[in-house]
C-alpha cells in the first residue's frame, strides 16, 4: 500500500494526520471515550450531574445585517461568533463544565456530579460569569447598525443516559431521558440576561445564592455577588486528548510508519462521528485549519424521532442496551436514506419530546435539486420509522409507539466553523431558514411532513402537496403558507 516512500514524505503524512487528529478531537465531545470504544459498538451509561442549556437571542439580526455583504459579511459574522463562543467556552472550561454539543447557536454543557455534590452551584457560578461576559456583546457594530446579543441560561440537576449508536462508518453520541428535556424546559422558561434554575438545582444550591420568588417550578438567580463572593475559577483548563507521541526518531523509517499507524488507529473512532462530506472537507482543509464561511441557500430538514428516547427512564436494569440498539438501527437506516440522496445527517440532539435529527441538503456538497432530494429522503424516512415501530422492543413492560414529525425549509443561511478556533468547535449551518424548518417540524402531526411554500414549488411536479393554509410562526412577522408533503405523484401512463 505504501510502496517505498521516502522518510520525508512519510513525515509529511504523519504531520498531516497529526493535525487532523487535533481537529477531530476539537470536533467531538469529551464524553466520547475513544480508548474504550470500537466504531459500531453500542454502548450506554447512566450519568449524573447538572446540565446547562444556553440560547442566543439576536443572532438572526446579526446574520441579516451581514448577509448583504457576501463573503466579507460572512467573515465579519464569523468574527463576532468566534469572539462570542471563544469567550463562553473559556468560562465554561475554567468553571469545570464540559461542552457536550452545539445546537445551532445554542450549547449544552455538563457539570459532572462529584463527591462534594456541588455541581449545581458550579453551574450557577459559571452561568453568572457567562452573563457578565455578555456585556461585551451588547452593542455590536454592523453594516446595518448596532445589534445587541443576549443570552438565556437554564440549569437543571438530574441524570441522563448516554448512548453510542450507529455503524462503524457513522456513529453518534446521544443523550436520552426526561431530565435532558427538563433542562431544556428550564432554559425556555427563563429570561434573557438571566440564569434560571429548576427545582432540583435550586434545592442543591439554595444556600449559596439568592433567588427571585414567584414560579414554584423555576427560580431566577439574583446576581448580587461581588467578584470575591463569586469566587475564582474552579479549575485550570485541561488540554487536548492526545493519542500519540510526537517524540520519535524521524530518521527511522519503521518508527515513523509505526507512528502513522498509531495516529490512524486514534483517528478512526473519532472520524466515525463526523459525516463523510464534512470529514472530507476537514481532511482537505487540515493544512489551513480553517473552513471559509459563506451564505449559501441550502434545504434543511428536521426530524423529531419520538418513542424510543422517552423510554430511557422506564428501562429496567439491562434494558438500556436493548433500547440503544433499536435507536441505533433507526439512526443507521435514516442516515442511509439521507446519505443515498446526497444529504448530510448532521447530528441527533435533544428535544422537548423525542430526539431531533438535523439534515442538510446543499452543504457542504452543492446540488441543483436539493428540495427533490430532501422530499425523497423524507418519504423514505417515514417508511423507516414505520418499520422501526413494528420491531420496537418492550421497555419497562411497555412497547413504545415510534413515530416522527418532519419539517423541510429552504433559503439563505450562514455556514461556517463555530466555536473556539483553537478548541471545541464544529461545522454548522445557522439562521432563520434553519429555525423555521424546526418550527415546521414542531407543527407536524404523527408521521407528517410539513414543508414551506418554496419547497412546495420546487417539488410539486413530482410530489403531491396538500395546502394547510397560512400559519403564524414564532419569529415571523407575517403568516406563512404551509403544505403537507403527501407522497410521490403516480406516474402517468
Image (cartoon, grey):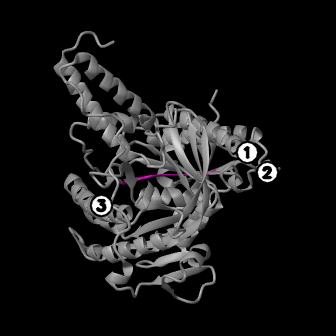
In the picture, residue 471 is in which quadrant?
A: bottom right
**Residue 252 percent across, percent down from the top left:** 21, 18
In the picture, measured across the screen, residue 339 lies left or right of residue 217, that is left
Q: How many marks?
A: 3
In the picture, residue 265 is in which quadrant?
A: top left
Q: Quadrant of the N terminus?
A: top left
**Residue 354 percent across, percent down from the top left:** 63, 55
Residue highlighted by disc 3: 86
Question: Who comes first in sequence, dot 2 or dot 1?
Answer: 1
Q: Residues within 10 Å of mark 3 (few under 14, many from 20)?
A: many
How far apart are the alpha carbons under marks 3 and 2?
A: 43 Å
Tell me, for residue 396, which label it has, or none. Answer: 2
Look at the image and give the residue range highlighted in magenta: 405-413
Residue furthest to the front in view is: 115
Mark 3, secondary structure of its residue: helix
Mark 2, secondary structure of its residue: loop
In front: 153, or 48? 48
In the picture, measured across the screen, residue 118 lies left or right of residue 442, that is left
In the picture, measured across the screen, residue 379 lies left or right of residue 221, that is right
Question: Who comes first in sequence, dot 3 or dot 1?
Answer: 3
Q: Can residue 468 be seen in this view?
A: no
Residue highlighted by disc 1: 319
Q: In this view, does 117 lie above or below 345?
A: below
Q: How crowded is mark 2: few (under 14 residues within 10 Å), some or many (20 or more)?
A: some
Q: Main secondary structure of the magenta part?
A: strand
Tell me, for residue 480, which label it has, or none. Answer: none
Question: Who comes first in sequence, dot 3 or dot 2?
Answer: 3
Pointer 2 with pointer 1, Cβ within 8 A: yes
Q: Is residue 389 visible?
A: yes
How far apart are the alpha carbons under marks 2 and 1?
A: 8 Å
Pointer 3 with pointer 2, Cβ within 8 A: no
Q: Nearer the viewer, mark 3 or mark 1?
A: 1
Amino acid at each position: 500500500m505504501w510502496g517505498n516512500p521516502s522518510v520525508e514524505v512519510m513525515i509529511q503524512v504523519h504531520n498531516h494526520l497529526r493535525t487532523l487528529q487535533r481537529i477531530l478531537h476539537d470536533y467531538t465531545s469529551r464524553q466520547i471515550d475513544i480508548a474504550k470504544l470500537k466504531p459500531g459498538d453500542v454502548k450506554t451509561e447512566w450519568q449524573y450531574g447538572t446540565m446547562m442549556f444556553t440560547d442566543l437571542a439576536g443572532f438572526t439580526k446579526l446574520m441579516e445585517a451581514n448577509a448583504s455583504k457576501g463573503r466579507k459579511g460572512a467573515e465579519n459574522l464569523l468574527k463576532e461568533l468566534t469572539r462570542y463562543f471563544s469567550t463562553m467556552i473559556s468560562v465554561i472550561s475554567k468553571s469545570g463544565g464540559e461542552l457536550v454539543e452545539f445546537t445551532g447557536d445554542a450549547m449544552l454543557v455538563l457539570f459532572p456530579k462529584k463527591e462534594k455534590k456541588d455541581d449545581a452551584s458550579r453551574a450557577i457560578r459559571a452561568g453568572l460569569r457567562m452573563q457578565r461576559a455578555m456585556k461585551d456583546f451588547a452593542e455590536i457594530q454592523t453594516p446595518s447598525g448596532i445589534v445587541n446579543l443576549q443570552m438565556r441560561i437554564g440549569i437543571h440537576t438530574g441524570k441522563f443516559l448516554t448512548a453510542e449508536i450507529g455503524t462503524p462508518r457513522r456513529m453518534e453520541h446521544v443523550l436520552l431521558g426526561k431530565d435532558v428535556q427538563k433542562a431544556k424546559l428550564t432554559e425556555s422558561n427563563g429570561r434573557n440576561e438571566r440564569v434560571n434554575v429548576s427545582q432540583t438545582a435550586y434545592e442543591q444550591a439554595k444556600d449559596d445564592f439568592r433567588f427571585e420568588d414567584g414560579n414554584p417550578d423555576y427560580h431566577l438567580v439574583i446576581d448580587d455577588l461581588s467578584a470575591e463572593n463569586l469566587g475564582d475559577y474552579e479549575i485550570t483548563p485541561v488540554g487536548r486528548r492526545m493519542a500519540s507521541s510526537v517524540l520519535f526518531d524521524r530518521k527511522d523509517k519503521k518508527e515513523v510508519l509505526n507512528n502513522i499507524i498509531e495516529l490512524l488507529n486514534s483517528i478512526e473512532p473519532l472520524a466515525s462521528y463526523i459525516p463523510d462530506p464534512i470529514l472530507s472537507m476537514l481532511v482537505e482543509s487540515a493544512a489551513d485549519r480553517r473552513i471559509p464561511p459563506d451564505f449559501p441557500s441550502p434545504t434543511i430538514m428536521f426530524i423529531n424521532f419520538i418513542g424510543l428516547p422517552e423510554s430511557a427512564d422506564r428501562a429496567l436494569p439491562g434494558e438500556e442496551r436493548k433500547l440503544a440498539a433499536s435507536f441505533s438501527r433507526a439512526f443507521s437506516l435514516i442516515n442511509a436514506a439521507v446519505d443515498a440522496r446526497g444529504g448530510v445527517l448532521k447530528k441527533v440532539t435533544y428535544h422537548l419530546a423525542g430526539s431531533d435529527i438535523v439534515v442538510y441538503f446543499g452543504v457542504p456538497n452543492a446540488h441543483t435539486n436539493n428540495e427533490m432530494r430532501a422530499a425523497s429522503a423524507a418519504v423514505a424516512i417515514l417508511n423507516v420509522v414505520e418499520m422501526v415501530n413494528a420491531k420496537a422492543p418492550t421497555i419497562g413492560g411497555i412497547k413504545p409507539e415510534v413515530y416522527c414529525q418532519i419539517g423541510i425549509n429552504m433559503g439563505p443561511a450562514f455556514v461556517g466553523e463555530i466555536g473556539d478556533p483553537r478548541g471545541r468547535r464544529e461545522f454548522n449551518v445557522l439562521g432563520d431558514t434553519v429555525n423555521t424548518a424546526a418550527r415546521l417540524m414542531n407543527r407536524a402531526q404523527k408521521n407528517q411532513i410539513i414543508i414551506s411554500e418554496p419547497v412546495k414549488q420546487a417539488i410539486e411536479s413530482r410530489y403531491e402537496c396538500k395546502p394547510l393554509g397560512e400559519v403564524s410562526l414564532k419569529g415571523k412577522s407575517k403568516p406563512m403558507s404551509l403544505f403537507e408533503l403527501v407522497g410521490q405523484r403516480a406516474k402517468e401512463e
